[in-house]
Amino acid sequence: MKMIDAECVFCKIITGVIPCRKVYEDENCYAFMDIAPFERGHTLVVPKRHLAFLTDMPDELLIHLILTTRKIAAHILQELPCDGFNILQNNGECATQTVPHVHFHIIPRWNNQKPRWHSSEGCQSNDEITETHKRIAINGN
Ligand code: 5GP
Ligand code: ZN
């Protein structure tokens, strides 16, 4: 059973080869801030095991991943804070999946603000991103 793909960007993040702003980690899941966020606090939640599609996931791991995604979303809602959020999950290049390692996007949203469905890279300073990270990182992570 292949756990890690040495060429995969997210496997490199999970194993510390590529740095990231970590939001959460447990035995089976890892969450970190998206490098090209649609909105402030845009977070990705991934299984540690390298699987490309949602449909490749064993039941137990998928249940754990979605419950973890809910936990992180609840934390972001309260601590960022935001008024709502989108969960986005792409499978295959035809569906705009660019990293073939299963992931849920958590995209924070605010009342009276039109949802943006593309990167807002450059809209936030490094200090702002650091401040957002402090708010949404789950303690002990
Ligand atoms: P997809 O389009 O596959 O659903 O989303 C992949 C996401 O991964 C994109 O939003 C992209 O910005 C993010 N991403 C790609 N490479 C990196 C990286 O090296 N670090 C981080 N933090 N995010 C990345
Ligand atoms: Zn991977």
Image (cartoon, rainbow, N blue to C red):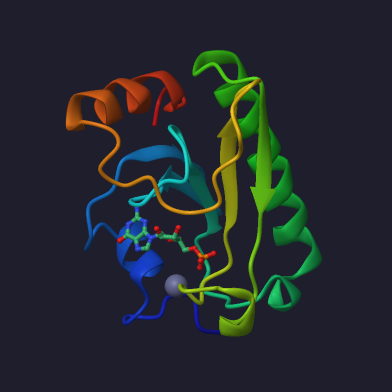
Above or below — where is 93 with respect to 22? below
Q: Which of the pair 25/22 is nearer the observer?
A: 22
Q: Which of the pair 29/99 is nearer the observer?
A: 99
Q: Is residue 42 left or right of residue 115?
A: left
**Quarter assignment of residue 124:** top left
**Residue 109 appears at what percent x and percent y?**
60, 30
Q: Is residue 27 visible?
A: no
**Residue 59 appears at what percent x and percent y?**
80, 64
**Quarter assignment of residue 61:** bottom right
Q: Quadrant of the C terminus?
A: top left
Above or below — where is 115 with respect to 93? above
Q: Is residue 45 left or right of residue 89?
A: left
Q: Is residue 122 visible?
A: yes
Residue drawn at x 31%, y 41% is: 21
**Residue 91 appears at what percent x and percent y?**
65, 75
Q: Which of the pair 16/109 is nearer the observer?
A: 109
Above or below — where is 137 with respect to 2? above
Tell me the quadrant of ligand 1.
bottom left
Q: Quadrant of the N terminus?
A: bottom right
**Residue 49 appears at what percent x and percent y?**
53, 68
Residue drawn at x 40%, y 25% is: 140
Q: Which of the pair 9/36 is nearer the observer?
A: 36
Q: Is residue 24 left or right of residue 15?
A: right
Q: Is residue 53 left or right of residue 125?
A: right
**Quarter assignment of residue 17:** bottom left
